[in-house]
Amino acid sequence: DYFTDNAIAAIEANKNRPFFMYLAYNAPHTPLQATKGDYDALPQIKDHTQRVYGAMIRQLDRRIGDVLQKLKDTRLDQNTLVIFTSDNGPWFEGSSEGLRGRKGMPFEGGQRVPMIASWPGRVPAGKTVENPAMNIDVFPTVLALAGLALPSDRVIDGRDFWSVMPNDDAADPHDALLFFHDKVID
């Protein structure tokens, strides 16, 4: 709630000029905490820990909706790129839609997460892109969209993935993606 309330205030304060916002929620990380209302709304989840986790995601979904609504209310939604993604796969084994592994594992279930982009008129609605991208790709992509060059005084590992968004024939921006993890989280 704190992050969302401050994000909404920042949107209001900057609505008349270009701005960049990086909104990194700590939910649904530990400590696992949820409101009674969100917990009670998920009686189909019998395991207590998974139910609290699900309730946290329910609250997160609602509060992201509040941020998106603020963009609409300030008429910024039509000229704003919104990217939603995660830094790792799900916490619980078996909750990654049949993929092997979970958070902290180098397997696809620990690494593969959705990346959702919305920008009316620029990102085709309902389009699915199968090319993999990583969080390190967001920086070069946003710079390219803003018409700015990558810094030349350091190595940037990410790639501009914008070309794959509107173009079904675009080449994958990566030659290879490697995932390493020094331990398995239990």
Image: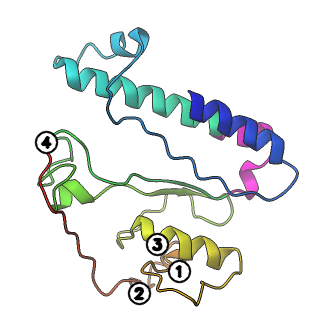
Question: Which one is in front, 32 or 121?
Answer: 32
First in residue order: circle 3 vs circle 1: 3
Name above or below for residue 71 compared with residue 39. Answer: below
Q: CA distance from mark 3 to mark 4?
A: 28 Å
Residue 166 in view in this figure? no
Give the residue drawn at x 67%, y 35%: 6
Nearer to us of marks 2 and 3 is 3
Question: Which one is in front, 149 or 174?
Answer: 149
| Circle 3 crowding by C-alpha within 10 Å: few under 14, some 14–19, many from 20 | some
Using the image, tell me which numbered label, if any, was put on residue 163.
1
Residue holding disc 2: 171
Q: Amino acid at mark 4?
A: Gly
Q: Quadrant of the N terminus?
A: top right
Q: CA distance from mark 2 to mark 3?
A: 15 Å
Residue holding disc 4: 94
Occupied quadrant, residue 162: bottom right
Tags 1 and 2 touching, CB below 8 Å:
yes
Q: Amino acid at mark 2?
A: Ala
Residue holding disc 3: 137
Residue 131 is situated, as x and y percent measured from the top left of the image, at 36, 73
Farthest right residue?
16
Q: CA distance from mark 1 to mark 4?
A: 33 Å
First in residue order: circle 1 vs circle 2: 1
First in residue order: circle 1 vs circle 4: 4
Nearer to us of marks 2 and 4 is 4
Residue 120 is situated, as x and y percent measured from the top left of the image, at 67, 57
| Circle 1 crowding by C-alpha within 10 Å: few under 14, some 14–19, many from 20 | some
